[in-house]
Amino acid sequence: MRSHGVPEYPDPNSSGQLPKITPGNEQQLGVSQTRFNTAQAACQRLWPYQAPTQAQQRSDLAAALNFARCMRSRGLPSFPDPITDPSSGRVVFVIHTRQVGFNPSSPQTLAKVRGCQHVLPPSMRRGGPDAVQARITP
């Protein structure tokens, strides 16, 4: 970003996370929206958080559906099907604890998760770049 006209673009934080610069606040970096967008377009291929393609979304969703089936076959009949998060394009399991009848954080559930991870591609497993996310709500 700096070499493409945004000299004040910040470094990643200590966790390696890049700051989120949203449209309209690029002025805090001392550049116009046009200059920022031009630099962003030039650097897009280097951005570590690429949204998945539609083909990747379909493949990830199919793998996550197999994971849900595996979880149901291991004694969690109300384990939900995954959804694709519309804002990120990533696969998410939305787990409403009152509705599903199990504790997603219990050792028993986590053992079942470990037992079903084999149906997911390595990139979607815990710690992978496209790891499946769970949103747990009451």
Image: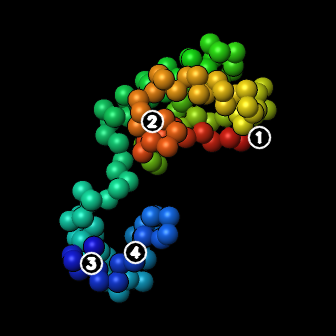
Q: CA gap, disc 4 to disc 2?
A: 27 Å
120 in relation to 36, above or below: above
Residue tagged 1:
138
| 1 or 4: mark nearer the eye | 4
Between 33 and 72, which is closer to the camera in this rendering? 72
| Residue at which label 3 appears | 2
- Element under disc 2: helix
Give the quarter of the image for residue 109.
top right
The answer to the question of whether label 3 and label 2 lie on touching residues, with beta carbons closer than 8 A, is no
- Residue beneath the point at 58% across and 22% down: 115
Numbered badge on residue 11: 4
Q: Residue at x 77, y 40 (%)?
A: 138
Instruction: Indicate the amino acid at tag 4.
Output: Asp
Q: Nearer the viewer, mark 4 or mark 3?
A: 4
Q: Nearer the viewer, mark 1 or mark 2?
A: 2
**Image-based side of 117 in relation to 32, left or right:** right
Q: Give the amino acid type for the residue marked by disc 1 in the picture.
A: Pro
Q: Which residue is mark 2?
A: 124
Vertical arrangement, residue 79 with respect to residue 130, above or below: above
Does residue 75 appear left or right of residue 42 in this picture? right
Mark 3 residue type: Arg
Horizontal side, residue 85 vs residue 102: left or right? left
Say which label, 1 or 2, has the lower sequence index: 2
